[in-house]
Amino acid sequence: MAIISASTGRWELVNPHRRIIAWRHPCNFDDTGRWHLVGADDRTIEPYRDDETTELADDFIDSLIICRCGSTADAGAQLSVIASLTAELDARLPETIYQARDQDYTWTEIAARLATPESTIRHRYRDYVTRRKETTLETPLNPQPTQQPPPPANHP
């Protein structure tokens, strides 16, 4: 696979046969940084483990161990990196759930994507989503800079 820049300015992810798999346009302010799949079924609707997921996780763990100057053969290093990744992913979950709710996903749909009972998801994250919505509503869209009084003049 390779990422190429098309004449339109968009980036394209192509397979070895030069078939476009996905694309993204860096200047699209609505979807900045998001990849759009071309002609593929959405396999993100529910979580599952497959060879691609396993291979990606292995590569990610090994890469992080190497970045931290450890040995990929050391089980202790693997444990530390897995714990770090688990903590990071757990920390990102509340905000991602808020974003899903903001994009009109129901609690049932979110629970299905997390393979967790809806009641559990609601119980854990409802307060965060509610507080986050209130914070967003209270924040002005175009905050005005505060005016500072001029400094006092120095008189001899």
Image (tube, rainbow, N blue to C red):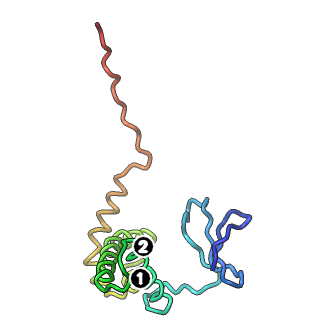
Amino acid marked by disc 2: Ala
**Which residue is nearer to you in this view: 91 or 156?**
156
Q: Quadrant of residue 33?
A: bottom right
Residue in the picture at 40% in, 75% down: 64
Residue drawn at the location 31% of the way across and 86% of the way down? 75
The quadrant the N terminus occupies is bottom right
**Residue at point 30% right, 66% down?**
130
Q: Secondary structure at mark 2?
A: helix
Residue 154 higher or lower than 150, as above or below: above
Q: Which residue is mark 2?
A: 100
Marks 2/1 in contact by CB < 8 Å: the verdict is yes
- The CA distance from mark 2 to mark 1 is 9 Å
Please state the total of marks drawn on the protein image.
2
Where is residue 60? Give x, y as percent: 43, 79
Mark 2: few/some/many CA within 10 Å (<14, 14-19, 20+) = some
106 with respect to 122 (left or right)? right
**Amino acid type, callout 1:** Glu
Q: Quadrant of residue 80?
A: bottom left
Dot 1: what SS? helix
Residue sitting at the far top: 156
Asked if residue 130 is positioned above or below residue 57 in the image, the reply reads above
Tell me which residue sits at (33%, 78%) in the image: 81
Q: Nearer the viewer, residue 113 or 27?
A: 27
Residue at the bottom extreme of this rendering? 50
- Point out the image quarter for the C terminus: top left
Query: Which callout, 2 or 1, points at the residue further toward the start of the chain?
Result: 2
Q: Residues within 10 Å of mark 1 (few under 14, many from 20)?
A: some
**Vertical placement of 117 versus 7: above or below?**
below
Q: Position of residue 76 (x, y in %)?
A: 28, 83
Find residue 5 and name its label: none
Q: Which mark is residue 109?
A: 1
- Residue 136 position by quadrant: bottom left
